[in-house]
Image (spheres, helix red, strand yellow):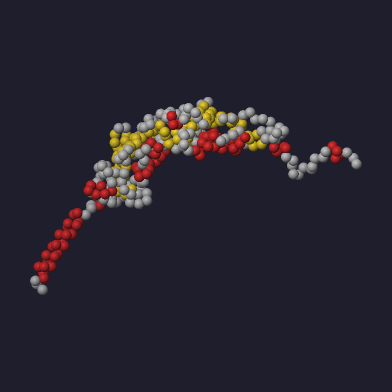
Amino acid sequence: MKRWIPILGVLLVVQLALAIVVYQTRPNYGAFEPRAKLLAFTASDIDGLQIDDGKGSVQLRRKEGRWVLAEPADAPADSGRITRLLEQLAKLDKGWPVATTAAAAPRFKVTDDAFERRLTLLTGTQQVARLYLGTSPGIRKVHARPAGDDAVYAVALETFEFGTGADDWIDRRIVALVADDLVRIALPGFMLERADQDWRLSGLAAGERTDSEEAHVLASKIADLEVQSLLGSEEQPSYRQATPALELTVAKRDGTELTYRFSQPEHENFWVLRRSDLPYFFKVADYAVKPLKEATREQLISQHDGAGGTAEAAAPSPSAPPATTPEENVDG
């Protein structure tokens, strides 16, 4: 029995040594505060955002309270979307790290040389924060590493929200208008003018009345027009803007007149739009332009009869007695 005592003592020492090694080499999660913010910045202080994917990049700037693209120069960006994303980034907590060493970062694609996205937040020319986005561990999750931090975190973001093309950030409602601000719309063959809250066709003949509902629908389609993408500020021969297929003009309450020129590139099913007040060419979907191109005066007339009376007057009332002829009034 005594000879086992030294052996057991040696085993105990070995176990203690192994325990010490494991304790010293395990990740030190005690240094992490899961409720700490992933990035230290205030969203309203940020006026510059650069997004890289390793192949291309996009730069966004806030000017005079609105976000714009650096290229094409000062093209309006979707300010609301950018503001929401910055606020989302500012609210992100770190949570528990999924890795804590610099050696693990390449596996999650969050290094200086390999990343899915690199977000650089600026105030003026000063870098405020930088975040690397990499692989995804699941739905609406992405591995992220703040610059200067070896730890990798899984946060509630999606890579596709941070595109690197101008079309990913363009304000698709750049040509949209407030419908109530419009007072006149001129299309080929007819003109609509606002009368109080209703629209009225100009030059109505006797017996004609404007279909108010159809007129409002048409005005809304023009006011709510959205673009698909930005084609740039340089006109291309393929746009065929010299021979537009449709031109329309709208007048606003403040006296401003805007002309829309739509052309269709050969063998394409989209339209190119140039509006008189903007220095850009836009791509617009066929389904958005087709109702404007096919609109006719006849579609906006709710009633019309050839005798000059209204359609309602021309039709006898079901409850009225039948009309009699002079012959029927002659006695026997």
Quarter of the image with the C terminus is top right
Query: Quick one: which residue is furthest to the front in this view?
Result: 267
Residue 165 visible to the viewer: yes
Instruction: Tell me the quarter of the picture where residue 80 sits.
Output: top left
Query: Quick one: which residue is furthest to the left in this view?
Result: 3
Give the percent coordinates (x, y) of residue 245. Answer: 51, 31
Say whether residue 42 is left or right of residue 4: right
Give the percent coordinates (x, y) of residue 109. Answer: 28, 46
In this rendering, the answer to whether 94 lies above or below 82 is: below
- The residue that appears at 15% across and 59% down in the rendered structure is 17
In this rendering, the answer to whether 99 lies above or below 90 is: below
Which sits in the foreground, 46 or 60? 60
The number of numbered badges drawn on the structure is 0
- The residue that appears at 69% across and 31% down in the rendered structure is 206
Say whether residue 329 is left or right of residue 249: right
Residue 196 visible to the viewer: no
Say whether residue 317 is left or right of residue 278: right
Give the percent coordinates (x, y) of residue 10. Answer: 11, 65
Which sits in the foreground, 68 or 221? 221
- The residue that appears at 74% across and 44% down in the rendered structure is 318
- The residue that appears at 72% across and 37% down in the rendered structure is 313
Give the percent coordinates (x, y) of residue 37. Answer: 31, 45
Which sits in the foreground, 308 or 139? 308
Instruction: Tell me the quarter of the picture where residue 91 sits.
Output: top left
Query: Quick one: which residue is furthest to the bottom in this view?
Result: 1
Quarter of the image with the N terminus is bottom left
Query: Quick one: which residue is furthest to the top in this view?
Result: 255
